[in-house]
Amino acid sequence: MAETSIYTLAVHAGERLLKTDPREGEPYTPVVTPIHHSVGFTYADTEDLDAVFAGESETPVYARYGNPTVYALEAAVAALEGAEAALAYGSGMAAIHGALLAAGVKTGTSVAAAHDVYGATYAVLDRLLRGNGVDVRFVDVTDLASVRAALAETQPVALVVETISNPLLKVADLPRLAEAAHAHGTALIVDNTFATPALCRPLALGADFSVHSATKYLGGHGDALGGVVATSSIRRWQLNEFNKLLGANLGPQEAWLIHRGIKTLPLRFQRQCANAAQLAAWLATQPAVARVNYPGLPGHPQHDLAAGLLGGRYGAMVSFELRDAGRAEVFRFMDALRLIQPATTLGDVYTLVLYPAMSSHRALSPAMRRRIGIGDGLVRLSAGIEDATDLIADLEQALAAI
Ligand SMILES: Cc1ncc(COP(=O)(O)O)c(C=O)c1O
């Protein structure tokens, strides 16, 4: 039988797992998983409760150990990512931290990471982990020779990369990176937030953890903060053992919202990718724009790699450098936008812009930003599902206002 389409999986995966209704004897199952606002879960037989505490049963007992609404979301993400299992977190950052812990990061170990990862991920590695005695090596993951050299030199427990990087939109060669990492016993942690499982399933390409800020495309409506790690069953168990102690859990209300968002992920993302491609092509023709970063443009350095890896679509994020611009010009441009929202997030149904130097990459020093290519005139755009003609009209009048 043919593999189930992601459009079908997104609608049904994770639902109707709960076969028994709380009112014993009722012969029905809710079509949509209810929001289980309960911290504790009781059992008729205390032996059953004991089995849960012993780890013999993965049924709910206490919200920090798991919750049925959250389980439903986790099952949905696992299905979309082609993973055995997934664990949800209260934020994308908590998910990244969880994956690092489960990969074995602790004092005295090494970690390698792409030098242009999302700013908060960079800060976790550079400040939190380094400050706790972890040797952290930042590398340009588009330069495989330098990645291999860093792996050989430091033998890190984890290599952290983004499928499509934030905000420069470089594309990581996941199969080659997985091969290089595994040659040194290094776990590959992939932040798949920008690609989503609609474009890429990192585990099938060799990654050990596929991490999402579920706040972004998975939720898709800018109304819930969350994160998720898709991985093997055994690694999910490890992640959950940490979470049972650390309590970085996702709440049931957020889990429900994100799970509802997932049902339209493939549809939304199809439109968002098409809009991004149209906006990128238009921006590239504008005299006020010095450079456009979009993997779908033929001039993008990893365009061919992206074409193979992402199945002919290139994501819905675009970044562009305003010509001869700094903070003042970028602010004038952002203030002039009427339809597009200057908000610090991405992946929503609304088109959004952000100034990385002020927000997502503020944690990096200006020198470091310049070194990795985040200039003072760089703007990041997250394409929504509006009509591209309306978006272009808004960009046009804002560019004229600089
Ligand atoms: C690529 C990427 N990963 C992780 C995160 C962190 O996610 P959250 O804000 O849900 O903690 C973000 C946030 O913008 C992001 O863009």
Image (cartoon, grey):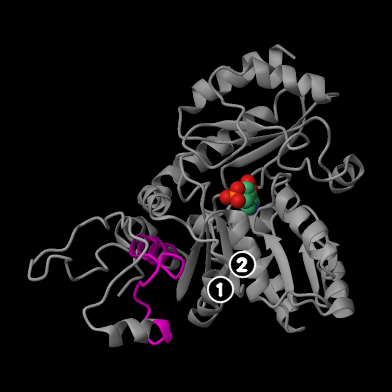
Q: What element carries label 1?
A: helix
Tell me if mark 2 has few (under 14), some (14-19) or many (20+) residues whose alpha carbon lies within 10 angstroms of its own. Answer: many
* Residue type beneath disc 1: Leu
Segment tinted magenta in the rendering: 53-77
Circle 1/circle 2 CB separation < 8 Å: yes
Q: Percent position (x, y) of residue 401?
A: 71, 11
**Residue at 70%, 62% in the rendered image:** 161
* Residue type beneath disc 2: Gly
Q: Look at mark 2 in the image and give the residue it sits on.
A: 98
Residue found farthest to the front: 46
Total marks in image: 2
Q: In this view, does 229 lie above or below 285?
A: below
Q: Is residue 177 visible?
A: yes
Q: Look at mark 1 in the image and give the residue it sits on.
A: 239
Describe residue 354's horizontal placement relative to residue 200 as left or right.
right
**Residue at 41%, 64% in the rendered image:** 63
Q: In this view, does 83 lie above or below 370?
A: below
Q: Percent position (x, y) of residue 28?
A: 11, 64
Q: In which quarter of the image is residue 51?
A: bottom left
Front position in the image: 92 or 288: 92
Q: Can residue 287 be seen in this view?
A: no
Front position in the image: 97 or 190: 97
Give the mark nearer the N terminus: 1 vs 2. 2
Q: In which quarter of the image is residue 107?
A: bottom right
Q: Is residue 245 above or below residue 118?
A: below
**Residue at 46%, 29% in the rendered image:** 386
